[in-house]
Image: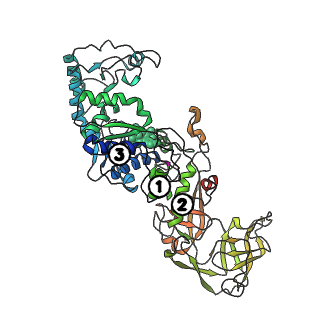
């Protein structure tokens, strides 16, 4: 398979092929699994989904659709202490928002607790599992190292009847946490540490979000996962590379328990993004320590965070198609994700004028009582989006940054005596600067060229164009400017705490911003390009008369620049 061109993907076309799709196509052709294709997305409900999960979701649901199969949504809820229904709900919302549908096929590993228990008793009777009563420390000591083989536990040769009795009493709640575990009897000298009699069940007196207190023993991931796959008729169990060394155990569990179904585990490289942490444990720390405002903070790499930030599901799917699926670990530049979002928003976001840091302009030769309407283009990329009228009057707001009293060379915006084009309107000239007693510029006195919109000087060219709003009609808004949450391209590199790599300027809340009147009526989730400023979306914190906008991305495309586009 040739390496994928990361820019080869398209928004609407099918995903390009990759080594997994090649395997699935071969299996279907040769009639393996009777030609069926069933995949699953198996999140543990212990956090919100992040962009790495989106890669797995696009792969699992994508393969199912492309091969006429099914994809199950399965909650891998075998660890009651960390899981919560809030996460179960958010995961469903996020998968749906990304555009995927599991139909009736939503399952929980906890649905299989009874079946999993039955298979465990069978393993005991077959002499393939035993109850170990070593302490956790002893078990660790007996495990050996990568270079030294492990040692057998002194409980390893317990007769099956004794194991069965102990296991049943574990289930019945006779023992406190940690006193016994059920282990597979495989090979303590295996070069693969996962095969050194791995734990199948542990005692955990904890209330489960679905099964309540029905159980006080819980299966491990390595035991529950393959059997859950098999019970659901999963044919291709796609997981990330760190499970490659677990595959012999996956196969062992299937071979020894003989459930209906023969799933096959295939590993692919997980998504890594620079400037981003993706482990749920670390994301939880950001939430719990109030470093961000919840899982859906627009700075979070979670699906919920990106949604609130204004990313589109189409852009995220397109990003996943562009990065492709391969077996080799790599780090993707977060600029590619931002580029993909920009490309999508460029096509469909309506343009609007907004002034984030207003500076007042008075046009001295414009009549005080006049307001005229100028025509503005809603989306130059999409003529069907039409035009709208903007009020223009004697008093305007412009962006503070668009004026400099002492401009450097090549500053083509406004300065004393200079001229600029007001977007969709007239040419403006700065005549005088008004300052407060401290010397700060508080107002510009200007003149305009009355013929420069539709008159005899309409074609007169000046070097700069700036955005503006009519002061009387503009509405107030808060704008939240986001930057990367981490300032290091590899947060936590070399084992240091990623929280030491935080970008102190990742959120700036600016109030007293000015927006076009119509934007005050926008609904949470509406997306716009504020001309010259970037893409923005309306935040759910907006209230009538107090709209809030999030900056999604700037207009500067560092990815396109790197690619020489
Ligand atoms: P994390 O390591 O972020 O805590 P996880 O693997 O523990 O994630 P799960 O809920 O177990 O989270 O993940 C569900 C599925 O998503 C798994 O199949 C997992 O392989 C996949 N997945 C998780 N992170 C990534 C990633 N960065 N890239 C691709 N797939 C991922
Ligand atoms: Mg996991």
* Element marked by disc 3: helix
Q: Earlier in the sequence, mark 3 or mark 1?
A: 3
Residue 25's disc is 3
Question: Could you say where residue 20 lies in the image, as x and y percent from the top left?
Answer: 40, 43
Q: Tell which tag, 3 or 1, sits nearer the viewer.
A: 3
Residue beneath the point at 34% across and 43% down: 26
Q: Within 8 Å of ligand 1, the CB of disc 1?
A: no
Question: Could you say where residue 389 lies in the image, as x and y percent from the top left?
Answer: 55, 80
* Element marked by disc 1: helix
* Residues rendered magenta in the picture: 323-332
Q: CA distance from mark 2 to mark 1?
A: 10 Å
Q: Main secondary structure of the magenta part?
A: loop
Report the side of 456 relative to 345 (left or right): right
* 10 Å crowding of disc 1: few (<14), some (14-19), many (20+): many
> How many numbered dots are placed on residues in this image?
3
Query: Is residue 331 shown in magenta?
Result: yes
Query: Which quadrant would the C terminus be assigned to in this image?
Result: bottom right
Q: Earlier in the sequence, mark 2 or mark 1?
A: 1
Q: How is the image coloured?
A: rainbow
Q: Residue furthest front?
A: 30
Q: Are marks 2 and 1 in contact (CB under 8 Å)?
A: yes
Question: Could you say where residue 548 lies in the image, as x and y percent from the top left?
Answer: 52, 63
Q: CA distance from mark 3 to mark 1?
A: 22 Å
Residue beneath the point at 49% across and 74% down: 385
* Residue that mark 2 sits on: 343
Residue 468's disc is none
* Residue that mark 1 sits on: 318
* 10 Å crowding of disc 3: few (<14), some (14-19), many (20+): some
Residue 490 lies, with reference to residue 250, above or below; the image says: below
Question: Could you say where residue 268 lies in the image, as x and y percent from the top left?
Answer: 43, 39
Q: Is residue 291 visible?
A: yes
């Amino acid at each position: 398979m040739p390496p994928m061109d990361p820019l080869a993907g398209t928004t609407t076309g099918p995903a390009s092929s990759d080594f997994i799709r090649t395997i699935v196509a071969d299996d279907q052709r040769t009639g393996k699994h009777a030609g069926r294709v069933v995949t699953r997305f198996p999140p543990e409900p212990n956090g919100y989904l992040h962009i790495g999960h989106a890669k797995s979701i696009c792969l699992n649901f994508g393969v199912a659709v492309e091969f006429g199969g099914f994809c199950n949504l399965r909650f891998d809820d075998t660890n009651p202490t960390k899981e919560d229904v809030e996460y179960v709900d958010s995961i469903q919302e996020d998968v749906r928002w990304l555009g995927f549908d599991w139909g009736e096929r939503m399952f929980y590993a906890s649905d299989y607790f009874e079946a999993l228990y039955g298979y465990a008793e069978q393993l005991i009777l077959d002499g393939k599992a035993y109850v170990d009563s070593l302490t956790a420390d002893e078990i660790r000591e007996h495990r050996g190292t990568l270079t030294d083989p492990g040692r057998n536990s002194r409980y390893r040769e317990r007769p099956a009847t004794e194991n069965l009795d102990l296991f049943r009493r574990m289930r019945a709640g006779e023992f406190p946490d940690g006193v016994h575990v059920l282990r597979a009897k495989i090979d303590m000298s295996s070069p693969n540490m996962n095969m050194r009699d791995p734990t199948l069940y542990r005692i955990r007196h904890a209330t489960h979000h679905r099964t309540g207190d029905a159980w006080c023993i819980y299966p491990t991931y390595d035991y529950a996962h393959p059997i859950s796959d098999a019970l659901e008729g999963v044919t291709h169990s796609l997981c990330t590379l760190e499970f490659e060394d677990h595959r012999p155990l996956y196969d062992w569990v299937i071979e020894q328990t003989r459930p209906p179904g023969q799933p096959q585990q295939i590993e692919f490289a997980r998504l890594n993004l620079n400037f981003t942490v993706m482990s749920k444990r670390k994301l939880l720390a950001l939430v719990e320590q109030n470093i961000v405002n919840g899982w859906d903070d627009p700075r979070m790499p979670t699906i919920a965070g990106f949604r609130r930030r204004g990313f589109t599901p189409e852009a995220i799917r397109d990003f996943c198609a562009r990065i492709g699926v391969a077996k080799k670990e790599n780090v993707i530049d977060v600029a590619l994700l931002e580029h993909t979002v920009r490309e999508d928003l460029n096509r469909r976001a309506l343009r609007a004028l907004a002034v984030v840091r207003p500076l007042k302009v008075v046009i001295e030769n414009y009549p005080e009582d006049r307001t005229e309407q100028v025509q503005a283009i809603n989306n130059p990329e999409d003529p069907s989006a039409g035009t709208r009228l903007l009020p223009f009057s004697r008093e305007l707001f412009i962006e503070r940054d668009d004026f400099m009293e002492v401009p450097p060379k090549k500053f083509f915006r406004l300065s004393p005596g200079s001229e600029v084009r007001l977007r969709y309107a007239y040419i403006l000239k700065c005549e005088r600067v008004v300052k407060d007693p401290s010397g700060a510029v508080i107002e510009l006195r200007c003149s305009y060229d009355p013929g420069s919109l539709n008159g005899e000087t309409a074609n007169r060219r000046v070097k700069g164009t700036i955005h503006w709003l009519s002061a009387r009609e503009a509405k107030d808004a808060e704008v939240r400017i986001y930057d990367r949450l981490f300032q290091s391209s590899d947060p936590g590199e070399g084992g240091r705490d990623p929280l030491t790599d935080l970008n102190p300027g990742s959120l700036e809340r600016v109030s007293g911003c000015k927006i076009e009147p119509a934007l005050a009526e926008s609904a949470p989730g509406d997306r716009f390009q504020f001309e010259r400023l970037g893409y923005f979306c309306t935040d759910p914190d907006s209230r009538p008369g107090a709209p809030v906008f999030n900056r999604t991305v700037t207009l500067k495309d560092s990815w396109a620049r790197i690619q020489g586009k």
